[in-house]
Image (cartoon, rainbow, N blue to C red):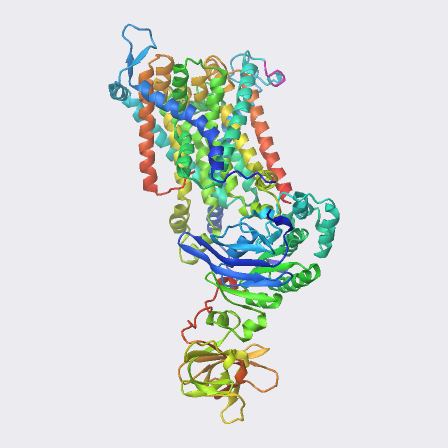
Amino acid sequence: MSITVPKVRVPYLLLFPGFAFLFTFFILPIVNLAQTSTQTPIAGGDTGQYEQSFAFSNYINAFLDNREQFARSFIYATLATVFALAIAYPLAYAIAFKSGKFKNILLVLVVAPFFTSFLLRTIAWKQILGEEGFLVPTLRNLHLMGQQTTITSTSIAVVAGMTYNFLPFMTLPLYASLERIDPRTIEAAGDLYANGITTFRRVTVPLSLPGVVAGTLLTFIPAAGDYVNAAILGSPNTKMIGNVIESRYFKIVDYPTAAALSFTLMAAILILVTLYIRKAGTEELV
Amino acid sequence: MSQKIKDASIPTIPFKARLSRWFGRNLLRIYMIFGFTYLFIPVAYTFAFSFNDSGKSNLIWKGFTLSNWQNPCGAPQICNALANSIKIGLLATIFSTILGTMIAFAIGRYQFKGRSTSNLLIFLPMATPEIVLGASLLSLFLVFKINPGFWPTVIAHVMFCVSFVVVTVKARIASLDPRLEQAAMDLYANELETFRRVTLPLVAPGIAGAALLAFSLSFDDFIITNFNSGTLITFPKFVYVAAARGIPAQANVIGSSMFFLALAIVIAGQLVNRRKAR
Amino acid sequence: MALDPIAARGDLRLTRITKSYGDFTAVDDLTLTIPKGSFFALLGPSGCGKTTTLRMVAGLEEPTVGSIHLGETDITTTRPYQRPINTVFQNYALFPHLTIFENIAFGLRRRGVKDVKEQVDKVLSLVELPHLAQRKPTQLSGGQQQRIALARAIVNRPALLLLDEPLGALDLKLRRQMQIELKWIQREVGLTFVHVTHDQEEAMTMADTIAVMNEGKIEQMGTPADLYDDPETAFVANFLGQSNLIKGKIDGNDGDNLVINLFGQKISMPKARSHAVDSSLYAGIRPEKFRISRTGSALRGNTLTGGHIEDVSYIGVSTQYVVAMPWGQELMVFEQNDDGVPPFNKGEEVVISWESSFTFGLRGDEDIEAGTEVNPEQLDE
């Protein structure tokens, strides 16, 4: 006796619980966020009381009031992505091509630091780069740094923190892509008169492009919405849009603005990502 | 003694050239050493300061002590926070792994209408900034007058972990040779038996990996948790709040322990794989 | 009402089987009977539909049209696990997470057989690998995996054993050895084997009956000797061994023979060996049937004059000649080096002769290039 479920139904049965969950707790919330974003305070009501009034002006106001933070978020995220790419690419290349039997160990070592809590790591950087650490006083004594300059509470620290924290998201896809390159293609390039640099430029880099795209996306998207690095390593001058949204939610209880900002952030990211993917030309990401 | 005679016809490479060649070959290896050092600096720092005789404020090195390791729950609230993180992590792992594995099988194994839309839907949560995920969920809970706390946090964690589980398990399913299942059916196993005896055992490592990933994502999560946990304290929240005053050394102890534990699990997994293959 | 599929025994009958994938027809109106107990080969180039046919018999694919019967039982739509048919897959498909013992025992356990250990031990002895029972498949060599895959199928005593190019991944020597062993096992155990391959030498060595397939259809079916000596189409003539195909016209009769005009030269061939439908035909002669002689020697049978040697290849066992004929065609000749006579030289003028009964005749509208494409898979590594 065999149990044969009609072949057509099985995939839908399997999908249903997970998708029902995602629908309730991902789609619906986003929709709800949308409807919150166009609300306005109830006249004469308490803080936190809002009513729907289709105030699309919320978006305009929110954006204009915070365009500095928006710009900063995208600049920091771009910088962090670029730096992460610069640091991670040679690392991934080295692990993929130059590590022989240590490949697996090295891969584990790339991911290992991220077993410690991300907050602990960021705070560690704060303390290492801070006044109480040993780096800053030493640099000051060597007159490489002014007595008034600090590393923490600057945008440099924030970007550095972001770069560091997103490094594995960049390294792993890069590695996966580089690892797939058949070493014989590289040999063939040499056989056809290309020197090391040319081979790299014309063979390795194009072939690793899917990894580059995946890595930059996996880095940029969370980086743009991040606020923890800015909160720990930065100052009020380095506020990112994430910080603003957080404070709108918890400190100022201004839900519509926070919602509008969130949507604007999502929309901006989506547009950038779509343009980027179109330009890079890779279809398969997931 | 005759070896001292140098054969003039064998050309020797000048020292400078040899040095630059050595550099060229090993440049990447040198870079790797610097790279890994950079990666481990904060980890080493955290580990080192777990031995600091610090009292409440773990900012300056005061002296070496083992007391933090002997009494990791010494700081107020810390073990409560840790326990919460672990509880939430386990629940989130179980649910997201089950839901995600089912989705992975559906998408990875079957051709059906809406397959590419499903793929896209799975990708969306991964592409959404955490702050938007957290904030939108909070909004929803508020509308239904549900207070943020333990279960809303679990739900939030399941939500963002599912996508990662799907991607991980799907990759494993894709590497499965379909002929193995055909062979099973050829050898008198019906669909259910084939799944039980051939498919599942072979996909299991992928599911295990996905579960591990889900747990670590959940345990380390701050932003989404911050929005949805209300007064409940998790370990990352504890660290964030304590950061202003100076985190207690016990937090370093716990952080370092998680590091070593996770490292041990991964290495053990690698060894098991290597033994299985032999 | 329906007979129990698992107990079905008898001849395998494929009736008007067609399998299409959208626009593409993999198997085209195929009808075939494979007698019980025979070693049957499905031979053809890749893409000809032989593997698809095999999979339909196994139950891993369903025919678009047509029916499959095993004895009296209609198994067309039964699931693979309901058929008394087992397959040896091309890449062996051994379960990597089970030991060799459990791999072999798999089918027995699913069927609820009681004396599992006994049966597994017996079949392991048959393939001479009893010491590997507790190993895992990844620890075995290709040849060993192949034999275990075979054991895993045979232990179930199926009505039909299907082999999907099982020897493809083995090196030449091992392949030859396995061909002999497989044939021996088939005789020993008495099962019906259906062997799918693109290697014509393999099919000819092992099979009692061969069906040559091309583009979803059976070109010709028969014993290896039938197919080799008397091919009915250009595809079969070219795919099995090599053929010389010379265009000609039937000029008349001479008793049981036809008189054929080949570019002005006259030859004769038995009427029964001609498959021409009108007066145009291709006269076919296998290269080893040709004899080369110098002009003026005494000759028997058909002769073609005016050729001169274009190329000589000394192979050791034989010498292969390419002879250019006056009408522009190059003929292949294989001469055995069995008489100590030195080979002919390039440029020499020669006469080709052969026994007329070796000639076969193909339809005049045949594509004489059919079956000649070199399949990369057929090149020995």
In this picture, residue B140 sits left or right of residue C313: left
Residue, far front: C1
Q: Quadrant of residue A54?
A: top left
- Relative to C363, residue C380 above or below: above
Q: Is residue C313 visible?
A: no
Residue, far top: A44
Residue C13 lies within the magenta run: no
Q: Quadrant of residue B52?
A: top right
In this picture, residue C154 sits left or right of residue B97: right
The C terminus of chain C lies in which quarter of the figure? bottom right
The image position of residue C270, as x and y in percent, is 51, 82
The image position of residue B168, as x and y in percent, is 50, 36
- Relative to B34, residue C181 above or below: below
Q: Residue at x 54, y 26 (%)?
A: B94
Residue numbers of the magenta segment: B69-73
Q: Is residue A107 visible?
A: yes
Q: Residue at x 31, y 21 (%)?
A: A260
Q: Residue at x 35, y 32 (%)?
A: A78
Q: Residue at x 50, y 39 (%)?
A: A6
Of residues B191 and B162, the one drawn nearer to the viewer in this rendering: B191
Dominant secondary structure, magenta: loop
The image position of residue A154, as x and y in percent, is 37, 22
In this picture, residue B135 sits left or right of residue A182: left
